Amino acid sequence: MKRRSRIRRRALLGACVALLAGFWLDAHLTQKASQRDLEYVYRRALGDMTGYVSGMDQTLEKALFTGTGQTQSEVTAKLLEQSGGAKAAMAVLPFSQEKTERISRFLSQVGDYALAMNREGENKPTGSNMTDNISSLRQYARKLAEALNGIQARLTAEQADIAQAESLLNNVEAIEAIPVLDDDVDQVAQEFTHFPTLLYDGPFSDHISQRKPVALAAVEGVTQEAAQEQAAHILEVPKEKLEFVAEGGSQLPVYQFRCGSAMLSLSKQGGRLVYYKQASQAGSKKLAYPAALEAAQTHLSRWGFSQLRESYYIMTDNLCAINFHSLYQTPDGQEVICYPDLVKVTIELEEGGAVEVDASGYWMNHQARQLKGPSLTQEEGAGAINPRLAVESASLALIPTPGLDELLCWEYHCTSADGREVLSYVNATTGREEQLFLVQRDEQGILVN
């Protein structure tokens, strides 16, 4: 009897131990999951803050070259968005308030100063005092961006953990135990000791809408079988080699097909090529840009795209991605490049094959436009250019607005005294500067932002 009691006690004890072990394991796993979730939140917030501050540096540089109140408003609206996003991201991170007070003040001042810039007035270039303030803001934005990028690099290299395990979950004082973040941020915060006080006021907002594919509005629909025949013609293979995958798209409905490692989508309206992707490893780089451009033009011609002109490109990983846009002429014969009608083509640089084509922008915007000539001459439109810029060349361009309307503009390719390339788009009717872009040109290609 006593033996049975001992066995029961041991079994009961074993069950209790197993039960407690289960509770402990469950709690441990739950805690680990919570730590991972918190780590993810912190990492994402740090990445967001870095992206916003880096964007502020670039937007502030654009602000130095705005020629009219219109583009000034667009630039300041972007600054307001970026500064607000950076502050929201920083609020999530476990920074001590004492060590980040100066940085928070800086982010607030960038946003508030963005509002002040809009009060400079319509069609009025940025004044000298404001230019000095913008340069100062950009200097500090660049320092902060460099520091945040450095923090991310150290976290990756050292495999550090922002969350600092359970101590950060339950003890606010554990923030001091995060040297990777606070030490770096504290060093950068010292840079903001002498940050200038700015005077500011003024509101600004904008709105972006969407449209339907105007190029296909009057085109009849095609069956799946007809689209498959067209896809086979594009790939130059028998249609039996194509496999129907699915129907897709929302604003631009498509049929999707697969042929080996190639995927392509054709519009339900008209069976036009919308997207193509070839899963292919980029080989060695044998072709330079001129040869890649010629290959892309040959592919586009075979696929039925005509009257296109290249604009910007980038070469990386033995691939060359090129942007093309449609061309029109005004009644007096002046050529106009239509930026809304975008076709993007990526060429592999070993043999010149197309590995990706995206024509969705073209079909969403292309139409039989009746373009009138410019009301302002090239010389008259140049009056809106910031005096700190020298005009190198000019041509006519049709550009999309934030509301997805279209404006005929003079496109001025300009340079600053220090060699910075800038594109300014001046309304060919009103003389208002509508858009401003910074040109990035290096061995990899030409991009604007």
Image: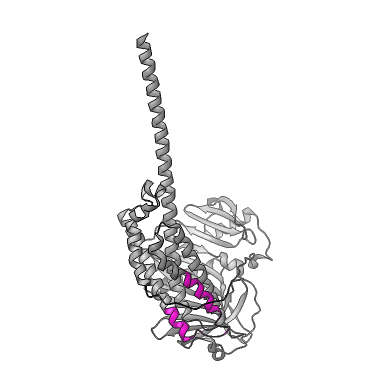
The residue lying at 37 percent from left, 63 percent from top is: 99
Q: As rendered, which of 436 and 300 lies closer to the eye?
A: 436
Question: Residue 119 in magenta?
Answer: yes
x and y, in percent, of residue 14 in the image: 37, 23
The residue lying at 60 percent from left, 57 percent from top is: 249
- Color scheme of the displayed model: one colour
Give the vertical position of 41 relative to 98 (above or below): above
Give the vertical position of 178 relative to 188 (above or below): above
Q: Determine which quarter of the picture holds residue 431.
A: bottom right
The residue lying at 54 percent from left, 87 percent from top is: 384
The reply to whether residue 162 is in sight is no
For the N terminus, the quadrant is top left
Give the vertical position of 111 relative to 223 (above or below): below
The reply to whether residue 393 is in sight is yes
- Residue most extreme to the top: 1
The part of the chain drawn in magenta is 108-135
Question: Residue 351 in magenta?
Answer: no
- Looking at the magenta stretch, what is its main secondary structure? helix
Q: As rendered, which of 77 and 420 lies closer to the eye?
A: 77
Q: As rendered, which of 263 and 433 lies closer to the eye?
A: 433
25 relative position to 367: left or right: left
x and y, in percent, of residue 123 in the image: 57, 85
x and y, in percent, of residue 223 in the image: 65, 55
Number of marks: 0
x and y, in percent, of residue 178 in the image: 34, 55
Give the vertical position of 233 relative to 310 (above or below): above
